[in-house]
Amino acid sequence: MKILITIALSVLSHFSLATLLSTGLVINDAWAGSAANERVYFKLAKVRESEEHDLDIVSAGMFKIRPDGVSFADLTRIESELNGDAWTLDFGGGYNYQGLYFAFGVALGRNTDTDDNLFAYYPEVGVALDVTRELAASISLKRYHRLYSEDEGIVMIGLLIRQ
């Protein structure tokens, strides 16, 4: 019975991931703005250490800024002494106002220590500022819901490399 439940959860998680990814791509393509006004970056980000949580998070992925919106997709590594280590695929999007963005994201993944599936969602508020024509810096506040047993508030600091 446990094997059937595991297979069902695996199939459901892949279906949900495909559905959510295609929905995100449709929303992303529907945003107004020409290609000349959009900036696409490769993003590397790390969580700022805190006494409030034991999470060590590193992510790498794509970050796109348009005049009216942002979108992102990241592969994220989460390390936690209390809850185990995990890999997640994070993606989402939101609104941009002069470099300040408000976004909503989803994290789908697997805890590699406990073999549990993970599903979390989070609001994110951040700012992305150009340092040079090719480099930018970002800082964002995320509030993970359902990542582990408690909600987790984190601060991510990132380096954006323009493509």
Image (cartoon, rainbow, N blue to C red):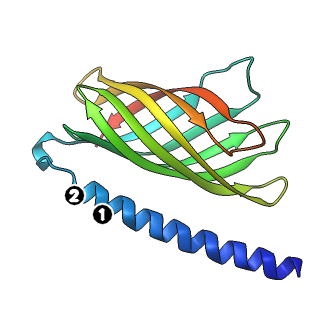
Distance from Cα at disc 2 to Cα at disc 1: 6 Å
Q: Residue 49, relative to residue 120: is it above or below? A: above
**Mark 1 element type:** helix
- The amino acid type of the residue labelled 1 equals Val
In the current view of this chain or complex, which residue is farthest to the top? 51
111 left or right, relative to 101: right
Q: Give x and y (percent) for residue 51.
A: 75, 17
Quadrant, the C terminus: top left
Q: Nearer the viewer, residue 2 or 39?
A: 2
Q: Nearer the viewer, residue 53 or 56?
A: 53
- The amino acid type of the residue labelled 2 equals Ala
Q: Give x and y (percent) for residue 75.
A: 54, 50
Q: Residue 130, relative to residue 36: is it above or below? A: above
Q: Which residue is mark 2?
A: 30
47 left or right, relative to 151: left
104 left or right, relative to 95: right
Q: Which residue is mark 1?
A: 26
